Image (cartoon, rainbow, N blue to C red):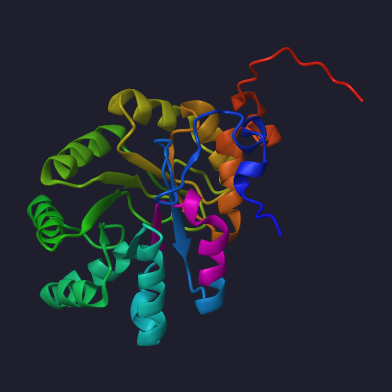
Amino acid sequence: MRSISQASWPSALNDPSGRREVAQNAHRTTGRGKTMVIDKGLGRHAFSDLLETAAGYIDCIKLGFGTAPLYPTDLLLSKIELAKRCGLTIMPGGTLLETAVQQEVVPSFFRTVCRLGFNGIEVSDGTIELSRKLRTDLIKEGLSNGLNVVTEYGKKLSGSLVDANELVVTAEADWQAGAALVTIEARESGMNVGLFDRNGECSQSVLEAVSHSLGDISRIMWETPLKQQQVLLLQTFGSEVNLGNIQPSEVLALETMRRGLRSDTFHFGARVEPFIYMI
């Protein structure tokens, strides 16, 4: 039987935007916009199904909060290995590192992360307070262990909004220390934190202040767990915006929006020939 592949679809249907083709050799998107998935407890088969279906449209998987130590070790190792085999960054949630700081076991945290095979970490202070020096030290420790380091700005406390000026100062220091991306906190609910109000709607004034202050947002990842938030950020910054805390079941849906294959961003599609409908 003849093999049927993604190439069977005309390119104008596979990627109307012309910017999100999958790199066949590494199962990656060549577009700049990155997608980070939050895994709150997928089992072996669900995780395998996620990667079989959508690995080409994911850049990073975060095992949310402090879930990583709760897995049976063989399952955790299996998930880490499978993600890395697909060329993804996989990391424990930032809350786990915050717990390590609070419990004074940071060296053990890094030894365990490396022994298990994680290739990334998130440095955050959403629940505790980190001094600037300690935040920088944690970033550099991650890098010295060969890990991809992302940081997170913002508090998890309900009602905590982004301070644009503080974000710029923090982000610049994080990048100078070696962080690859700075994530803007929205929690997994996307409500009443960061850019978003208690209904999950974005504060336009805060978004405008943040984007104006930052200028280049290519090293910012916006946590957008809700569809309307993803639509807004895509419409504001385009298909190349970095989006995080995406639910596993929503990866393909997000990718269709990035490509102009969904009504919300249909205008992303770049039609190159006059439209003539024929039956």
- Left or right: residue 231 versus residue 203 is right
- Left or right: residue 233 versus residue 137 is right
Residue at the spot x=66%, y=52% of the render? 4
For the C terminus, the quadrant is top right
- Left or right: residue 146 versus residue 47 is left
Q: Is residue 231 magenta?
A: no
For the N terminus, the quadrant is bottom right
Q: Determine the image quadrant of residue 97.
A: bottom left
- Left or right: residue 17 versus residue 158 is right
Q: Which residues are magenta?
A: 47-64
For residue 224, above or below residue 209: below
Residue at the spot x=48%, y=69% of the render? 40
Q: Is residue 48 magenta?
A: yes
Residue 226 position in % (x across, y down): 57, 49
Residue at the spot x=61%, y=29% of the render? 16
Q: Nearer the viewer, residue 211 or 47?
A: 47
Residue 201 visible in this rendered orientation of the protein: no
Residue 76 position in % (x across, y down): 38, 79
Q: Nearer the viewer, residue 105 or 177?
A: 177
Residue 158 position in % (x across, y down): 44, 55
Residue 91 position in % (x across, y down): 32, 64
Q: Nearer the viewer, residue 225 or 160?
A: 225
Marks counted in the figure total: 0
Q: Nearer the viewer, residue 10 or 98?
A: 10
